Image: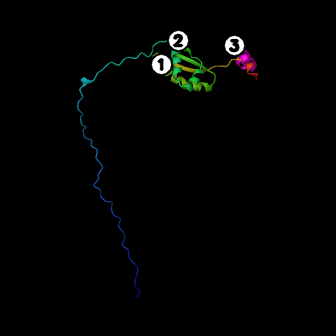
Amino acid sequence: MAQNTSVTTTPKVASAPPQNSFRPQSISISKPKVIENVSSTNIVREPIPVLNLNNSFDDNEFFSAWEKFQNTLSDEKRIGFSNLNIPTRKEGAEFIVLVNNVMQENEAKKLLSEAVQFLRAQLNNSAIVISTKIAEETEKQRTLSPEQRYMEMVAKNPQLEELRKLLSLEID
């Protein structure tokens, strides 16, 4: 008779995780603790000053504040700001800056948002608005050749011709 030599194994039973006595802290919904009453006699109540942000100003005050703002800018921003045309008053506290093209208009809008905030604070007027407008080219500007443009520049500044001769430059 043949003996059964197979080994029988007992199945392993998974044990439950050990029970910890650690429990998360509970949250209470009871009445909050009352902190000592602070006497209101120690609080100083001053009236809030009324700010008059609609002061009138003349063009000289505006341009003086405009120059102050330009002096507060970094060198890089100052160059872009100085390339802008001087604003002209449209009506009241509205001003327009003429620009030559769309790229200059985009750069101007970045600088003018800072300028408006500065001018409003300096002139105590919250109604100040500066907008941009692309200047229309006139027919005269379109029809001038390089030589004609140079001649107009020489008419305005005769030393330009002397400089051209000194540097041996040609007009293209």
Q: Amino acid at mark 1?
A: Arg
Residue at left 55%, top 14%? 89
Which-is-in-front pick, marks 3 and 1? 3
Task: Give the position of the N terminus as an image quadrant.
Answer: bottom left
Query: How far separated are the C-alphas under marks 1 and 2?
Result: 15 Å
Q: Which residues are magenta?
A: 141-163
Q: Quadrant of residue 148?
A: top right
Which residue is the site of mark 2? 60
Q: Please state if 159 lies on the left or on the right of 43 as rendered.
A: right
Which residue is the site of mark 1? 120
Q: Earlier in the sequence, mark 3 or mark 1?
A: 1
Local secondary structure at mark 1: helix
Query: How far separated are the C-alphas under marks 3 and 1?
Result: 37 Å
| Mark 2–mark 3 CB contact (< 8 Å) | no
Which residue is the site of mark 3? 156
Query: How far separated are the C-alphas under marks 2 and 3?
Result: 27 Å
Local secondary structure at mark 2: helix
Above or below residue 16? Residue 60 is: above
Query: Can you name the residue that lies furthest to the front here?
Result: 166
The reply to whether the magenta stretch includes residue 152 is yes
